[in-house]
Image (cartoon, grey):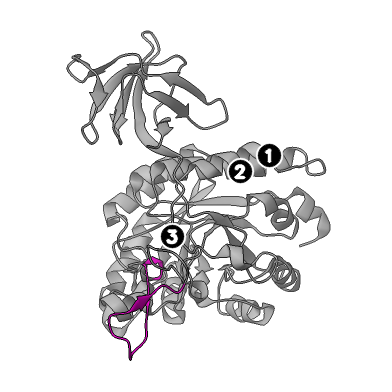
Amino acid sequence: MNIHRKELFKPELLAPAGNAEKLRIAINYGADAVYLSGQDYGLRSAADNFSPGEMQESIRWAHNRGKKVYVAANASIHEKDLKNMPDFIENLKKASPDGVIVSDPGILELIKNNIPKAKIILSTQANTTNSESARFWKAAGVDRIILARELSFEEVKRIIENVPEIEFEVFVHGSMCISYSGRCLLSSYMTGRSANRGGCTQSCRWSYRLLEEERPGEYMPVYEDNRGSYIMSSKDLCLIGRIKELIQCGVQSFKIEGRMKSVLYLATTVSVYRDAIDTWAQDTRGFEVKKEWEEELGKVRHRGYTEAFFDNRPSYDGQLYENEWNTEYVLAGIVKDYDEKTGVAVIEQRNKFSVGDKIEVIGPGRDWFSQVVEKMTDDKNNVIDSARHARQEVRLSMERPVNAMDILRKPAG
């Protein structure tokens, strides 16, 4: 990749899609591509995921809008798992994804031989940390490598410079696993649910105390905290302040983590990184990180933020010792329909909100606004004072026009 391309290249914004609704939200809010999983072989078995029919329909929906879809099949594959692989591959052929994310060399070969049009993307689970490994995977048929999260910026830059003939993808936002590129045995050891096969229980984020074997019953906190000690829980990754460097070094795809995260998280993070990438493209020389981007990312539920390995090893501040979530806003509802003549929107409730609450309305782009809920009615046009039932449809008068898939959020607490 030459310097001229670095200055002009606009990276792909890649977002998680835990289900069909989240896929539509991600694309509507600015993602260039999404990644998802079927019912088997992905690493988020607790997510809703996609049946074969849902996958076909969702990929068709995305393609009709000029967007790409990558399917994750990056779990650790045991011999018994190969039994259903022919059906899985046949369903992938019908769905026609733009790429398949793999970590197992055998699965790589099966995808390459059976779905030749699909881009083969090497998962971060494969722990690619140097340029020689990248060349090896390129020779094996890989088209894109998701680099290990333990790399510093200088290491990422050198790998891209040394292997310009392959694409590279980097995580820029979301939860960080305490183990090496997600290869963790703790959950399997403690609960029988393997993180490498999609069943992570996040054991690293539990509260732990130290027990000395000759002092039974005396539980001592490793860190001074009366609720326990969270010695293996990382803060969340946030590289919004470093995207200029990542773009200029040639990273082709910016990846947001979170197939199991909320719709509000998804809409907010995608909107912020979309705006940041577009702002850079409009003025590469004068680009500056906006304070409002950091403020918006601070509003979604997160465990504090860190730039992790970007400047080499994380500092002491990269670890989360109290496991507290920062939650400024919660999802109140999603716009399902809007009547321009009456100015009334149909809202599907996701968390309780009431008359008198101040809500914010966010949508694709930056023309967001807030208003007080003055009045609401239910689906039978009865006046109600609160939307308290899960996924209840209510009608609200909006101070400005809104669109389907716009999101209502309100302060937490």
Vertical comparison of 239 with 362: above or below: below
Q: Main secondary structure of the magenta part?
A: loop
Give the CA separation, mark 3 to mark 2.
21 Å
Q: Earlier in the sequence, mark 3 or mark 1?
A: 1
Between 45 and 203, the one nearer to me in the picture: 203
Residue kind at label 3, given as amino acid type: Asn
- From the image, state whether disc 3 or disc 2 is nearer to you: 3
The x and y percentages for residue 162 are 75, 74
Crowd tier of the residue under label 3, counting other residues whose Cα lies within 10 Å: few below 14, some 14–19, many 20 or above: many
81 to the left or right of 231: left
Tell me the residue that label 3 is attached to: 323
Q: Nearer the viewer, residue 379 or 350?
A: 350
**213 in the magenta segment:** yes
Q: CA distance from mark 1 to mark 2?
A: 7 Å
Q: Amino acid at mark 2?
A: Glu
* Image position of 194 (left or right of 224): left
> Is any part of residue 240 visible from this angle?
yes
At a point 24% along the width and 34% down the height, the residue shown is 391
Q: Is residue 174 magenta?
A: no
Residue under numbered circle 2: 294
Q: Is mark 3 in CB contact (under 8 Å) with mark 1?
A: no
Which numbered circle lies on residue 290? Answer: 1
Tell me the residue at 43%/52% (across/down).
325
**Do residues under tags 1 and 2 come within 8 Å of each other at their CB atoms?**
yes
User: Which stretch appears magenta?
Assistant: 204-222
